[in-house]
Image: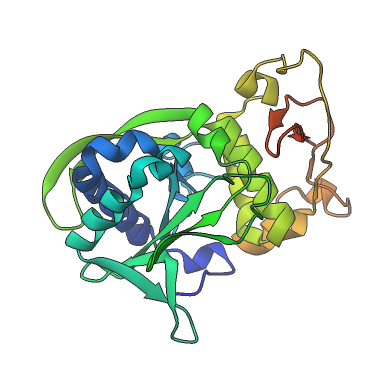
Amino acid sequence: MRQKPETASGYDSQVVENVKSACLYLATILGDLISDIVVVGGLVPYLMIEQKSKKGIIEKYVGTMDLDLGLSLGLLKKSRYREVSKRLRKANLKPDKNEQGNETFQRWIMTDSEDITVDFLINPSNITDKGGNLQNLEHDFAAVITPGLFLAFKDKLKVTIEGLTIKGERAKRDIFICGAGAYILLKALAFNNRGENKDAYDLYYILRSKNLAIRELFGANTEEGRPLVLYLFVFPPILINRFLALIKIFPERSNQDTFFSLHSIAPVFPIYGTAKIGITFSVL
């Protein structure tokens, strides 16, 4: 199990290319199941945002070291997840191990391909499911319960990956990735839960690169026709500065407490029964 780097300098551009190649390979073996799987996490900005050099503070995305796959609740019907694990095993994937040497059923490893790991996530299936716990699917196959993951299936983009797979085979496949709106919500929730510098950076990158307002991402209306704000997030600039190893991103704001302020009216989405969550923000 590799440790996640604390700063951008710990990310290698070749590693994210390997993750992309691994994603392409998995798309070739999962085939007809791909509509029930959506790519979330660090590979999304890399696939969503044009990675050519551009003017501005950030040019290329720093990358990711693993592949996060969201599984639809539809896979629970008729135990279709068994077909997913069957194909993964056939492709020489198996559960990874944590620092204590215990198997991690929610994270598998590509044993013969650069030690790339694949993390599995799934939306709560009932109101008693708690975020962060495991949904055990088989004796060695599980997924992390991730509140709000259903948004990635409602707001998803089809992208085409073409090139060499991690096995060196040439292929071209369509996959689904989390859309910008759902990605922002899920990343904001992740940041709220664990407060990692990388989460703050991911939000910063997608916002600056897309240059879109939340209303443009989600639309102006909520399901009930009225807004509801349940979250207020404040991002200290030092988190992003530490990750990017920059002295200051905005020197004139170096003494301010906030870099992003999530403050305005938001669309809302059901997560637990009648409970709602919604966020919007502006770049200060």
Outermost residue, bottom direction?
Answer: 100
Q: Is residue 65 above or below residue 249?
A: below
Location of residue 242 in the rendering, given as x and y in whole percent from the top left corner: 67, 64
Left of 239 or right of it: where is 107? left
Outermost residue, left direction?
Answer: 169
Q: Image quarter for residue 86? A: bottom left
Q: Image quarter for residue 102? A: bottom left
Location of residue 214 in the rendering, given as x and y in whole percent from the top left corner: 68, 26
Outermost residue, front direction?
Answer: 78
257 or 132: nearer the viewer: 132
Q: Residue at x 19, y 51 (%)?
A: 165
**Residue 205 visible somewhere in the drawing:** yes
Q: Residue at x 33, y 55 (%)?
A: 19
Q: How is the image coloured?
A: rainbow
- Quadrant including the C terminus: top right
- Quadrant including the N terminus: bottom left
Location of residue 88 in the rendering, given as x and y in whole percent from the top left corner: 25, 57
**Residue 65 visible somewhere in the drawing:** no
Q: Residue at x 22, y 54 (%)?
A: 87
260 or 38: nearer the viewer: 38
95 or 66: nearer the viewer: 95
Q: Image quarter for residue 177? A: top left
Location of residue 13 in the rendering, given as x and y in whole percent from the top left corner: 38, 58
Q: Is residue 156 above or below residue 24?
A: above
196 or 279: nearer the viewer: 279
What is the number of callouts on the image?
0
Q: Is residue 256 above or below residue 95?
A: above
Left of 249 or right of it: where is 53? left
